[in-house]
Image: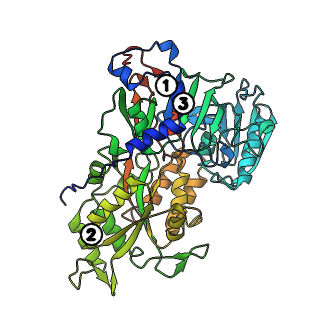
């Protein structure tokens, strides 16, 4: 199939509004930034490096639930105000944080973590094993996205030792040690999410909801100190963040690919590789089914394997990357491309129109009436594809994919809906969703029949006993390394799996790069491959950020 020459239309007429928003809701941040403005950079002026210890950032949305790790804060990036037992470095290798060591029993049921003894919370109180115990118990009771249902018990026999007992082996338990920020038992209350106390590198000093959060360095922090004493996070949408960068009022701004080709004086574009993917979720049951909540479920078109495989194979993912993402991204074939548990054998040759037509014909889908849409048993190959209204990247991907798929004789009707509407309609309509995590447990949640229909997990109601069996083996492995081949076989074991070659419950499209406009001379260090964009993943390595004095492009 030829290259697809569709382009994402640039947004016009909103830049002025963005500047007004920056000026009206970001006054505190704008006034206190010590970085030079775009005009000073143009004039070649230099600001003394000793005064540049504050930054203004527009790098993500406001956390709706506040800053409480026990209810989900920090799951897609550093918790910032809290520390974790372990963490992952730029290569995603495990390293110690609060822990000095950990061990796992041979049966995988008992995990022992030893803590460093020099840690204090930002209020000066020491962090002990009792705080870790309290955190995990609180998270287990929260009923949030943090799944601790397999934890049977947690004990603190002394100040520096934590003992976890699991009901069954769980290789993914290690991810909870790297993402769950530790909260203080003595300072945890009903309003903790608004007034967090932690042992992380920064402490929250002001939160103007809907506008900004101002944080300062935690003097009690035990780790490497950041070069920046104060950070102001502005809660701006993508247009307003770009406008702020143009106005010179932020030091770093997250922007969409649509703005990536436009130069901003005094700033450099940084592109970070991610597993922040976008893909089409297919309802897997025939029409007439019901969700666990009694909502209409199933779709007579997308429940047909030939339709799902044809959609997968006809889409030109490289064209989506070039046309919608301006080249900032890469094709996606799974929820975990380039992570250790993904299966390279599941990658396939896409943009093959003839193969798509062959698949449809073999599945009994033919254009009997010559209207350009194939049909089977009187059912037209036509279905809706929903996306979250207001997300122009998803809208653009959906429209472009629909145009590509139409060449094979499948009609896709693209519709933008609110999140509330989408949740209700997702059981019977295809949806363009986004996922991406450093934790293989997300793979389990998306494809396991055990969790189908829970929140946004597996709303297509996919179920394959063989896939469930492989993932169960992966979970019950005693280490991440032991689990890897089982995750890979769940994707494709040579006979079945959740990949395109198997059941194809998804048509994954692209992994987007996270794009940031960064003030010249600001070095944001070596970034991890980023997870999904919720949270502020770019800040995970803040202690490495610095001004590049050797070039000092100010």
Q: Quadrant of the N terminus?
A: bottom left
Sequence-first tag of 2 and 3:
3
In the rendered image of this protein, does residue 497 appear above or below residue 95?
below
Q: Quadrant of residue 164?
A: top right
Could you tell me if residue 68 is visible in this image?
yes
Residue found at the very far bottom of the displayed protein? 378
Query: How many residues crowd around disc 1 within 10 Å: few (fewer than 14), some, or many (20 or more)?
Result: some
Could you tell me which quadrant the C terminus lies in?
Answer: top left
Kindly identify which numbered label has been placed on residue 545: 1
**Label 2 vs label 3, nearer the camera:** 3
Secondary structure beneath label 1 = loop
Residue at 36% over, 55% down: 345
Q: What is the CA distance from the residue labelled 2 to the residue labelled 3?
A: 48 Å
Q: Secondary structure at mark 2?
A: helix
The residue depicted at 43 percent of the width and 47 percent of the height is 275
> Can the viewer see residue 92?
no
Question: Which is more toward the observer, 343 or 36?
Answer: 36
| Residue corresponding to mark 3 | 29
From the viewer's side, name the closer residue of 208 and 317.
208
Labels 2 and 3 touching (C-beta < 8 A): no
- Residue at 54% x, 58% y: name it: 444
The residue beneath circle 2 is 406
Element class at badge 3: helix
Marks 1 & 2, CB-CB < 8 Å contact? no
Q: Does residue 207 appear to the left or right of 300 in the view shown? A: right
Question: Where does the image place residue 190, in percent across and percent down from the top left?
Answer: 77, 46
Q: Residue at x 78, y 37 (%)?
A: 187
C-alpha distance separating marks 1 and 2: 47 Å
Task: Give coordinates of residue 469: x percent, y percent.
Answer: 54, 63
Q: Quadrant of residue 548?
A: top left
Image vertical order of residue 144 relative to residue 92, above or below: below
């Amino acid at each position: 199939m030829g290259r697809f020459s569709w382009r994402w239309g640039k947004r016009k007429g909103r830049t002025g509004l963005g500047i007004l928003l920056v000026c009206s809701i970001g006054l505190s941040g704008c006034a206190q930034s010590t970085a030079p403005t775009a005009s000073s950079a143009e004039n070649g002026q230099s600001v003394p490096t000793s005064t540049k210890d504050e930054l203004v950032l527009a790098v993500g949305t406001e956390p709706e639930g506040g800053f409480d790790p026990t209810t989900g804060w920090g799951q897609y990036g550093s918790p910032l105000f809290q520390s974790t037992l372990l963490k992952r470095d730029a290569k995603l290798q495990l390293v110690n944080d609060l822990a000095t060591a950990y061990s796992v029993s041979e049966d995988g049921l008992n995990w022992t973590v030893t803590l460093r003894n020099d840690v204090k919370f930002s209020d000066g109180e020491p962090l002990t094993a009792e705080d870790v115990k309290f955190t995990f118990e609180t998270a287990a009771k929260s009923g949030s996205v943090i799944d601790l249902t397999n934890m049977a018990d947690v004990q603190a026999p002394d100040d520096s030792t934590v003992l976890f007992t699991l009901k069954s082996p769980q290789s993914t338990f290690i991810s909870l040690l790297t993402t769950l920020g530790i909260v203080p038992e003595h300072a945890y209350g009903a309003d903790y999410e608004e007034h967090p106390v932690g042992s992380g590198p920064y402490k929250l000093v002001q939160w103007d909801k809907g506008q900004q959060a101002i944080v300062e360095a935690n003097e009690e922090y035990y780790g490497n100190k950041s070069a920046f004493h104060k950070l102001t996070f502005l809660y701006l949408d993508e247009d307003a963040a770009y406008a702020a960068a143009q106005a010179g009022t932020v030091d770093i701004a997250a922007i969409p690919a649509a703005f990536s080709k436009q130069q901003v004086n005094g700033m450099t574009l940084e592109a970070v590789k991610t597993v922040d993917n976008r893909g089409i979720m297919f309802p897997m049951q025939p029409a007439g089914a019901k969700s666990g909540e009694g909502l209409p479920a199933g779709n007579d078109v997308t429940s047909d394997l030939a339709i799902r495989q044809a959609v997968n194979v006809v889409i030109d993912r490289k064209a989506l990357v070039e046309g919608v993402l301006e080249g900032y991204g890469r094709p996606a074939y799974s929820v975990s491309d380039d992570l250790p548990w993904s299966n390279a054998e599941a990658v396939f040759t896409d943009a093959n129109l003839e193969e798509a037509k062959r698949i449809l014909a073999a599945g009994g889908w033919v254009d009997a009436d010559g209207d350009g849409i194939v049909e089977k048993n009187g059912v037209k190959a036509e279905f809706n594809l929903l996306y979250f209204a207001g997300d122009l990247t998803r809208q653009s991907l959906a429209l472009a994919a629909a145009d590509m798929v139409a060449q094979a004789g499948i009609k896709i009707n693209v519709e933008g809906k609110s999140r509330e509407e989408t949740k209700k309609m997702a059981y019977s309509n295809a949806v363009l969703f986004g996922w991406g995590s450093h934790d293989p447990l997300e793979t389990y949640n998306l494809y396991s029949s055990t969790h189908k229909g829970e929140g946004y997990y597996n709303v297509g109601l996919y179920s394959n006993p063989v896939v469930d069996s492989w993932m169960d083996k992966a979970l019950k492995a005693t280490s991440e390394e032991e689990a890897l081949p089982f995750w890979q076989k769940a994707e494709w074991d040579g006979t079945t799996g959740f990949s395109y070659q198997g059941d194809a419950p998804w048509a994954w499209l692209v992994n987007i790069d996270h794009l940031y406009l960064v003030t010249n001379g600001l070095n944001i260090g070596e970034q991890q491959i980023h997870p999904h964009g919720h949270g502020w993943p770019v800040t995970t390595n803040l202690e490495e950020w610095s001004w590049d004095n050797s070039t000092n492009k100010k």
